[in-house]
Amino acid sequence: MKPVAVLLFAALTLIASSAHAQTTFDVAITVDDLPAHGPVPPGVSRTDVARDYLAALKAHNVPAVYGFVNAVRLKQEPGTEAVLDMWRAAGYPLGNHTYSHMNINSGTLEAFEADLEAGEPAIRDRMTGADWRVLRFPFLSAGDEAHHAGIMAYLKAHKYRIADVSISFNDWAYTDTYARCMAKGDSEAVEGMKIQYMQGVKASIARSLMASEKVYGRQISHVLLIHEGAFTALMLPEVLAAFEEEGAHFVTLDQAQSDPAYSAPSAHQGEGLLIERTAKEKGIDLWSDAPPDVDISNLAGLCS
């Protein structure tokens, strides 16, 4: 073999080896704010959003995607019951996100518990024979010093599980802006949003994988939080493809949370993102050498 050919063969071997060494990881997809998250663009219905969501999830063979419900939206937007029914018809489970998306720190513990219970009928009635006592805390807030111990005792007594989160990329921030830009017919702004959004997706994957290695010395099974908004529905096929390209294998929430990282003792169980919470409790600096996150401050003024 000639010297140039030897060098080329070595380079190709190194590239192949690097590709083979790609990090692989399990991730469960979970969706907040069913049946309605934020405004929708003109001509788009809540069932359109749900249809696009479910089509993308099915196309990528994502199993048992929990949809976390704010049942107040059923009263605010009559007809959105269809979204929950579509979710169940697809074979996906529903969980509780409280009736009104209440922050536990905004009032008394009793008020939060009442709001949680008010959200149960819409879920329980559609989850006959299945486990529906799964809670996603609104704002990922599991209670300050005055609330945390009490809500943990309540959840244990009522056999609730917490749906923790390890990856999130601020998809919620695009929902209002997308509706405004579509109403104005500003397709150029929307195209820019798509690019920025996917930059955020890829940054969140890189940061979460790095953080997992730093905190646990390995890749834990991850849980992704996204919202059932119109822009996320639009982008979901690309989001799922990006996760797959980065080495993701889609699993159920139960499979992901069987990882010991989710049952490890914590004084702040359920609060914030799992890896960040654990790093804080262990005194680990996560972000000083981390890849940068994507700035979303431009979204508030876009198409305004």
Image (tube, helix red, strand yellow):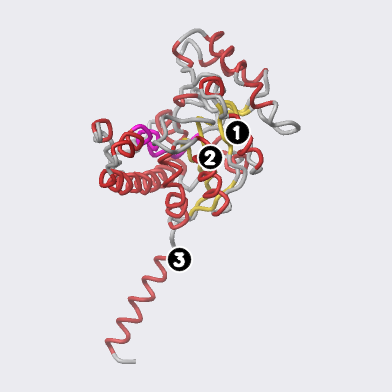
x and y percent of residue 53 in the render?
Answer: 51, 44
Query: What's the CA distance linking mark 3 and mark 2?
Result: 36 Å
Farthest-out residue, front? 43
Q: Quadrant of the N terminus?
A: bottom left
> Which callout, 2 or 1, points at the residue further toward the start of the chain?
2
Q: Which residue is mark 2?
A: 50
Q: Residue at x 42, y 47 (%)?
A: 235
Q: Which residues are magenta?
A: 165-176
Q: Are marks 2 and 1 in contact (CB under 8 Å)?
A: yes
Q: Nearer the viewer, mark 3 or mark 2?
A: 2
Decide: few, some or many residues near mark 1? Use Cα within 10 Å; few <14, some 14-19, many ≥20.
some
In this rendered view, identify the residue nearer to me: 12 or 200: 200
Left or right, 11 with respect to 89, comes to left
What amino acid type should be assigned to the residue bearing mark 2?
Ala
Residue 167 part of the magenta segment: yes
Magenta stretch: residue 169 in it?
yes
Q: Which residue is mark 3?
A: 20
Residue 231 visible in rendering: yes
Mark 3 surroundings within 10 Å by alpha-carbon count, few (fewer than 14), some (14 through 19), many (20 or more): few
Sequence-wise, which precedes: disc 3 or disc 2?
A: 3
- Residue 82, numbered circle: 1
